[in-house]
Amino acid sequence: MASTIKRDSIENGSQRRSPRQNFETWSWLFMRVSGIVLFFLALVHFFIMHIMHDVTTTTVAFVAARWSNPLWRVFDWLLLALGLLHGTNGLRYIMDDYVRSPVRRMIVKASVYGVSGVLFFIGTLTIVTFK
Amino acid sequence: MSPSSTMYKGKTGQWAFVLHRVTGFLVFMFILLHIVDVSTLNSPHIYNSIHRLYGNVFLRLFEVGLLFALLYHALNGLRVVMIDFFPKAIKNEKGVFLFMLSLAVIMTLVGAVFILKPFVTGKV
């Protein structure tokens, strides 16, 4: 970020920094905003499902009772969607840092995006079709 | 991405970053597993037997580990957001890191009591 500001201030002299935003700027903002939302979604989910209730009592009947309220389905779907997006984007940073060979990086990225996409589909299907 | 954009300078900041990355990776791996186990909901026998398996003491310890990873990642994430959005609000980054880390450890220990209690009382 700092280098962008520096470069822009050199190009524009003493003018304000350019408002042009690229993909990485939006990625940076998305991680912060989704992170704040996930802070509440993930911790509330963990508290209800692992602290208030024991893991062995969260059976199919338990989920059926919980999901009879569509708001919990929305809650869980948001957690699924934001969690996967935030996590996949985080993994993208990790892959950019550690997988140096361009060919290998492309293969690893394609696999990770593929797995995330398939799991997003499976998760959404579970939340929508469960009766 | 240039190396300088992902490299923190300073000792505690670097540890905070490493721990943030490792815990984020672990939580994400668990989410992948969790989506698969929940997808068995339409086969109640499989779902219920998986959840009985989660009651095993080793998987309960794994659950405690997940709680710590989640808490640290969430709390340190708040610290990162504060530094990025309100750079003047934090004067002592190291102190805030140690506070968040301690909070994560304490909350994990409290949560561990609830998670491990059924095992200790012999209900599992």
Image (tube, grey):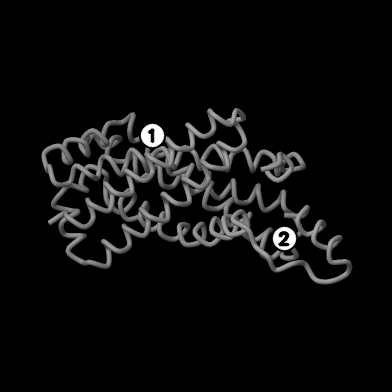
Dot 1 crowding, Cα within 10 Å, few <14, some 14–19, many 20+: few
- Hey, which quadrant is residue A127 in on the image? bottom left
Q: Nearer the viewer, residue B99 or B80?
A: B80
Q: Which residue is mark 1?
A: B62
| B48 sits left or right of A104 in the view | left
Residue under disc 2 on the same chain as residue under disc 1: yes
User: Circle 1 marks a residue in which chain?
Assistant: B
Q: Residue at position x 44%, y 42% from top?
A: B27
| B34 sits left or right of A106 in the view | left
User: As shown in the figure, which amino acid type bears the numbered disc 2?
Assistant: Ile
User: As shown in the figure, which amino acid type bears the numbered disc 1?
Assistant: Phe
User: Circle 2 marks a residue in which chain?
Assistant: B
| B2 sits left or right of A80 in the view | right
Q: Residue at position x 34%, y 50% from top?
A: A51
| B73 sits left or right of A55 in the view | right
Q: Residue at position x 69%, y 40% from top?
A: B14
Q: Nearer the viewer, residue A83 or A48?
A: A83
Q: Which residue is mark 2?
A: B90
* Dot 2 or dot 1, earlier in sequence: 1
Q: Nearer the viewer, residue B106 or A40?
A: A40
